């Protein structure tokens, strides 16, 4: 029987579909293996081991797990900084060795090895900076989470938008409008619930303008997005100067959302405070990340959204209305970004400040790409950015001798290396940014 | 279901792609639509499918007028279509592609992947197409992608099924299987519109034949008509379907491939110790069932593959390890197998596509400038010479009909200063008139003393063009034989039995 064959690669094994025929059987022979990931991991592990371990700081560092006011008080974990960093460096080297072995077997280094590697790397840095003092672990994590929340919302919004084929540069504007709407509505009505809703509507409105111009009138999406960001800054600045500033008690004093500790869970040392004693906006984030993932990858709507973002014409030929799908998906994405804006004001400082989004929308876009258009990974990337900002704050307070700007730079440097070496070749939705024109 | 088109007119700017077309398809009928490249067949079918809005005219299903605002409506009315250019999402699996738009779900919205897989398996078994539901479409060879397209249409139980050149990339065996399927569907009342350029298939399967030319219907034919009658009706002149060529006159040029081996990233042999020599003035054709290493062979020669060992010498110069640019500059003309993906840039104009692989230096550029005047003249003459049906040199290549896109690639590659010409499936999707022309041009290239390598899965094409035939099977050359070798022997070699 003569039939064409197909070769399919699934992980490391080769399945030859069609038993009657197939190309030559696998033979052990020297194909250049990809050593990129093990090299990156190995070099990082060595640098860490040498700089922070061998030439490390011999003073002790105390990792503080709890405050005296906590329900369960854990003793501090006191350790010699040098020993700590040496141990971590060796663990990192071990991971690099495993990665080398995997590469020699022509296997991909999995995420569940890379993520612990990153965590170890960060904690070694923390242990080194904290030498001679106390590291407030809970403060570090809670602060990181708080600083990341708007970025996570923005990144989710970006992931959804790009998956359906619309590049949403306007996340920055959506955060800003959401922040403004939440503060003003919350102040006027005295209801923070209404403030949250207003933030979502504000974000959605920005999305509607983006959708109208880019999907219906086919204006370039990036240009519309940039214009919308400028517009959002202009409008909020104008209203801030002309209305809010003089009557801040009336229009810009919404208060903040209360912390809602979850009984029992919030008493768990360290993670209880981080995960289970938070505001509703943070809980919403915990729910939204998996929800967006499930919707995008496990439901029929997600399948259609991704189809529209990859190959709109093909989606059209199976009866999917491309413009409508894009329109509504982008609107929902705008609501999520707006919610992130709300987290900036009523979910945090409790007042609107000029241009308070301060580029976080763009950081969210970076998280989208670093997270390879996947809600989980994008959220992780956003957390990494949040952690670096908070780390810098803490390092400054800890009186570290190294210039704080240098410390602030490190996580980004690591991010760059991670993107270059570990994320590998990331490919976004094929039709992102391209309008769909029907004949 | 009975389908009637009345006075359908579709214009693209000044171009009338369909000019008042009326056509009736009876229930259970297999209706063949014939016509040269750019005649308007695909356009007409896209109008029927709701993808294009007609400027004039009516569609009637079982004698009631219908209007479709999009393919969704057409599908709801029972119309299914296999598109000429695949409508598959490359990063989705086969099962995801098949279920898209009518997904089986649990709890109303969660995708039921097992059900989708079962559906794909069930259809592929029922129709004898073997396809793995979990394979990523982008990893599949075009022939298998074509099967996925067909499975996609069959999964929807259409009562009117449009098949736009589904056999262009199928093997003869697969084509025969498809024709059995078509007859079965027709017997159960499905009306089928079948578009193809292969007249053998038309004569075998059609109940009625309608011929289009330049956007109009120019006649009907009976399935008993001879191939040459059909060909003449299509292009409006007599077509000579045999290739005339003299004994090869060898020149000093030589293309030599020795012990060429290519591996994939996992170390599997895609090419296994392939050796052959082509002398100037000679055509070597590679025959074989699709997916036996032909694609990889051309890619390896072009320098598109990594993990290649062995030697490829053109006139004594080693090409293994050279960049694609160097290979092209050495005078290699290359027609890739997948024109839309590798042959043209759809968003570029016809003229720009014609200079695509010569964007630096003579004759199209000097320094940083493109010589637009020269390009324009060149493009106009190529359009006339290759009979590319386009509105102008500045039409976007993606807007051309399938066959005309192929002609753009051929025109570009054949008009270069060649030392070696490689063509994969050179006449895929071309009408009979264009095939005659392209075959003549390939023979003219050979007669100019250039080595020519043709890769084709069409045995007819292989036999009529080749001076010698190399048969590939599982990445190896089974044997190199004379062009006069019997088809039975060639068939056995294609199944891996050495002659
Ligand atoms: N989207 C479009 N925009 C502009 N012109 C188009 C478009 N689609 C098709 N055309 C033009 O309409 C004419 C008919 O094209 P069509 O694709 O229907 O031809 P065809 O009969 O299917 O040819 P082939 O056998 O080569 O596939 C061609 O001249 C083509 O250039
Ligand atoms: Mg066509």
Image (cartoon, helix red, strand yellow):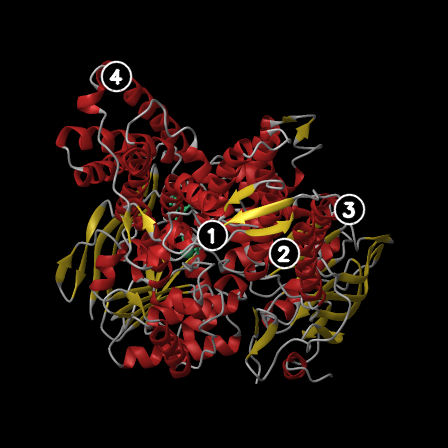
Q: Residues within 10 Å of mark 2 (few under 14, many from 20)?
A: some
Residue named by callout 2: B440
Measured Cα–Cα span from mark 1 to mark 2: 56 Å
Measured Cα–Cα span from mark 3 to mark 2: 24 Å
* Position of residue A231 in the picture relative to residue B238 (left or right): left
Count how many numbered circles sit on residues in the image.
Answer: 4
- Asked which quadrant contains residue A132, the reply is top right
Residue named by callout 1: A377
In x, y percent, where is residue B488?
64, 84
Q: Is the N terminus of chain A in the top left, top right, bottom left or bottom right quadrant? A: bottom right
- Residue A331 visible here: yes
Q: Are marks 3 and 1 on the same chain?
A: no
Callout 4: chain = A
Callout 3: chain = B
Q: Nearer the viewer, mark 3 or mark 2?
A: 3
Residue named by callout 3: B330
* Position of residue A177 in the picture relative to residue A31 (left or right): left
Residue named by callout 4: A245
Q: Nearer the viewer, mark 4 or mark 1?
A: 4
Q: Are marks 1 and 2 on the same chain?
A: no
At 49% across and 65% down in the image, what residue appears? Answer: B136
In x, y percent, where is residue A102?
67, 66
Q: Residues within 10 Å of mark 4 (few under 14, many from 20)?
A: some
Ligand 1 has an atom within 8 Å of the beta carbon of the residue at disc 1: no
What's the mark number on residue A389?
none
Position of residue B174 relative to residue B86, above or below, is below
Measured Cα–Cα span from mark 4 to mark 3: 72 Å
In the foreground, B393 or B152: B152
- Residue B43 visible here: no
């Amino acid at each position: 029987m003569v039939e064409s064959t197909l070769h399919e690669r699934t992980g490391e094994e080769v399945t030859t579909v069609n038993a009657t025929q197939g190309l030559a059987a696998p033979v052990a022979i020297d194909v250049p293996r990809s050593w990129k990931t093990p090299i990156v991991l190995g070099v990082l592990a060595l640098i860490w081991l040498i700089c922070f371990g061998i030439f490390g700081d011999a003073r002790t560092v105390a990792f503080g797990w709890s405050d005296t006011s906590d329900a369960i008080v854990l003793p501090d974990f006191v350790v010699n900084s040098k020993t700590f960093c040496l141990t971590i460096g060796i663990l990192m080297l071990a991971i690099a060795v495993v990665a080398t072995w995997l590469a020699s077997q022509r296997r991909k280094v999995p995420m569940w090895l890379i993520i612990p590697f990153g965590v170890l790397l960060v904690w070694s840095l923390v242990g080194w900076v904290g030498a001679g003092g106390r590291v407030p672990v809970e403060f570090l994590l809670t602060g990181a989470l708080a600083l990341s929340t708007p970025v996570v919302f923005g990144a989710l919004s970006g992931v959804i938008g790009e998956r359906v084929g619309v590049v949403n540069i306007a996340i920055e504007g959506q955060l800003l409008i959401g922040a403004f709407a939440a503060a003003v509505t919350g102040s006027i009505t005295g209801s923070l619930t209404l403030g949250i809703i207003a933030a979502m509507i504000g974000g959605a409105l920005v999305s509607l303008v983006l959708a109208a111009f880019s999907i219906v009138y086919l204006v370039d999406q990036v240009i519309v997005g940039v214009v919308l960001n400028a517009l959002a800054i202009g409008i909020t600045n104008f209203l801030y100067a002309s209305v809010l500033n003089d009557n801040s008690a009336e229009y810009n004093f919404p208060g903040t959302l209360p912390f809602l500790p979850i009984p029992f869970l919030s008493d768990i040392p360290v993670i209880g405070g981080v995960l289970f004693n938070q505001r509703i906006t943070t809980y919403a984030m915990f729910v939204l990340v998996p929800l967006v993932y499930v919707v995008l990858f496990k439901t029929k709507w997600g399948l259609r959204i991704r189809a529209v973002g990859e190959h709109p014409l093909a989606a059209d030929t199976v009866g999917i209305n491309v413009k409508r799908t894009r329109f509504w998906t982008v609107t929902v994405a705008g609501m999520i970004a707006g919610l992130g804006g709300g987290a900036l004001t009523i979910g945090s400082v409790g007042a609107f400040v000029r241009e308070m989004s301060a580029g976080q929308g763009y950081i969210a876009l970076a998280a989208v790409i670093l997270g390879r258009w996947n809600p989980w990974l994008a959220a992780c990337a956003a957390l990494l950015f949040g952690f670096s900002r908070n780390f810098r704050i803490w390092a400054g307070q800890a009186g570290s001798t190294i210039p704080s700007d240098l410390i602030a730079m490190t996580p980004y440097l690591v991010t760059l290396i991670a993107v270059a070496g570990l994320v590998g070749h990331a490919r976004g939705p094929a039709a992102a940014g391209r309008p769909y024109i029907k004949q | 279901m009975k389908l009637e088109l009345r006075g359908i007119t579709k214009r693209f700017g000044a171009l009338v792609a369909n000019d008042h077309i009326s056509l009736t398809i009876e229930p259970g009928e297999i209706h063949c639509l014939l016509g040269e490249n750019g005649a308007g067949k695909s356009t007409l079918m896209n109008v029927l499918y709701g993808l294009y809005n007609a400027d004039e005219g009516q569609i009637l299903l079982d004698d009631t007028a219908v209007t479709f605002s999009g393919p969704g409506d057409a599908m709801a009315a029972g119309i299914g279509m296999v598109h000429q250019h695949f409508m598959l999402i490359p990063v989705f699996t086969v099962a995801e592609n098949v279920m898209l738009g009518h997904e089986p779900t649990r709890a109303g919205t969660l995708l039921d992947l097992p059900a989708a897989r079962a559906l794909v398996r069930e259809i592929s078994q029922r129709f004898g197409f073997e396809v793995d539901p979990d394979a990523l479409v982008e990893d599949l060879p075009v022939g298998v992608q074509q099967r996925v397209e067909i499975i996609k249409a069959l999964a929807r139980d259409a009562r009117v099924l449009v098949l736009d050149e589904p056999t262009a990339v199928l093997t003869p065996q697969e084509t025969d299987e498809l024709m059995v399927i078509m007859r079965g569907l027709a017997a159960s009342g499905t009306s089928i519109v079948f578009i193809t350029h292969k007249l053998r298939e038309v004569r075998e399967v059609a109940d009625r034949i309608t011929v289009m030319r330049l956007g109009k219907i120019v006649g009907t034919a009976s399935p008993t008509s001879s191939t040459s009658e059909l060909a003449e009706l299509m292009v409006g002149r007599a077509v000579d379907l045999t290739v005339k060529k003299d004994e090869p006159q060898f020149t000093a040029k030589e293309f030599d491939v020795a012990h060429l081996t290519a591996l994939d990233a996992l170390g599997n042999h895609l090419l296994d110790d392939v050796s052959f020599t082509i002398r100037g003035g000679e055509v070597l054709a590679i025959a074989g069932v699709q997916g036996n290493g032909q694609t990889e062979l051309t890619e390896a020669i072009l320098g598109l593959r990594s993990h290649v060992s062995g030697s490829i010498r053109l006139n004594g110069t080693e090409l293994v390890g050279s960049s694609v640019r160097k290979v092209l500059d050495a005078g290699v003309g290359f027609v890739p197998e997948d024109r839309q993906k590798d042959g043209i840039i759809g968003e570029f104009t016809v003229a720009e596509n014609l200079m695509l692989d010569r964007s630096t230096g003579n004759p199209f550029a000097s320094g940083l400038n493109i010589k637009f005047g020269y390009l324009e003249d060149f493009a106009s003459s190529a359009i006339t010479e290759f009979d590319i049906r386009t509105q102008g040199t500045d039409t976007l290549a993606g807007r051309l009909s399938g066959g005309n896109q192929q002609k753009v690639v051929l025109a570009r590659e054949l008009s270069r200063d060649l030392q070696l010409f490689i063509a994969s499936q050179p006449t895929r999707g071309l009408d009979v008139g264009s095939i005659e022309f392209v075959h003549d041009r390939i023979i003219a290239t050979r007669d100019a003393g250039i080595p020519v390598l043709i890769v084709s899965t069409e045995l007819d094409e292989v036999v009529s063009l080749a001076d010698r035939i190399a048969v590939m099977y599982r990445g190896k050359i089974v044997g190199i034989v004379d062009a006069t070798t019997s088809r039975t022997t060639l068939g056995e070699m294609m199944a891996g039995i050495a002659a």
